[in-house]
Image (cartoon, rainbow, N blue to C red):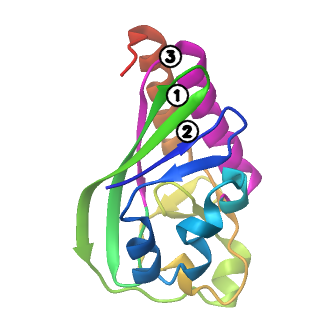
Amino acid sequence: MRVYEISAQNRIMSVSENWDGFALANTGEGALSATVRGRPIWDFVGGLETRSYLNALFFAARRHRARVAVRYRGDGPTERRVYQLQIEPQGEEDLRLLHIPLDIARRFCRAPSAEELARLSCCSQCLRWGRGAAWDDSDLFHGHAPGKVDFAICPACRIAAQRAIDQALSSRQVH
C-alpha cells in the first residue's frame, strides 16, 4: 500500500516509506519522493478529464468530511493491478490518499500501434480502451505506447465515482 498526503492546495506534503521502492521498480525515477514532495498533484495527473474526476472526489471528501473510495487499475509492464483509492479528510482541508492493492496478476501486454492510438481512448481509471460508446479490456499497455495516449474517463467509471460521492454524502463519516 502506498500512502501520501496532499494539502488544501493539492500539493503533495508527504509520501509513505515504500514510495521510492515502488517508483524505482516501475521505471518511475522521475517520481521519487524528493521529486514529488511539495509539487501539485496535478503535475502527475494527465488529462483534463482525469483531473476533473479526481478533483470531484477530493471536493466530496473535503466538503462532506467523509471517506471517498473508488477502484482503479494501475498496471505495470507485466502485471494487471487493481487498487482501491481511499481518500480521507485530514485536518481542515488536507487529504490522505491510500492506494490499497486488491488484486495483482501477471499478464501479457503489448504496445498499442499508432493506428490504435489514433482511434482509441484509454480510461485512466479502469484502463479499458474505448471508441465511442464501446469500452473493452484488451492486452494494450499504455505505458508502452509509441505516442501520446488520449486518457478519458469511461461511463462505467463516471458512474462508480458518482456512487462513491453519493455514499460520502449520505454517510458523512470522518475516518
Quarter containing the N terminus = bottom left
The amino acid pointed to by label 3 is Arg
Identify which residue, 55 or 137, lies in the foreground.
55
- Look at 49% across and 12% down and name the residue there: 169
Q: Position of residue 121 (x, y in %)?
A: 64, 65
The amino acid pointed to by label 1 is Gln
- Disc 2 versus disc 1: distance between alpha carbons? 6 Å
Read off the residue under disc 3.
65
- Look at 60% across and 16% down and name the residue there: 63
How busy is the neighbourhood of tag 1: few (under 14 within 10 Å), some, or many (20 plus)? some
Q: Earlier in the sequence, mark 2 or mark 3?
A: 3
Q: Position of residue 92 (x, y in %)?
A: 59, 19
The amino acid pointed to by label 2 is Arg
Specify the segment rendered in magenta.
45-73
Please determine whether, in this image, residue 57 is positioned above or below residue 127. Answer: above
- Disc 3 versus disc 1: distance between alpha carbons? 16 Å
On screen, residue 106 versus residue 138, left or right, reads left
Read off the residue under disc 1.
162
Answer whether labels 2 and 1 touch (C-beta < 8 Å): yes
Please determine whether, in this image, residue 39 is positioned above or below residue 116. Answer: above
- Which mark is nearer the camera, 2 or 3? 3
Please determine whether, in this image, residue 164 is positioned above or below residue 83. Answer: above
Read off the residue under disc 2.
158
Q: Secondary structure at mark 1?
A: helix
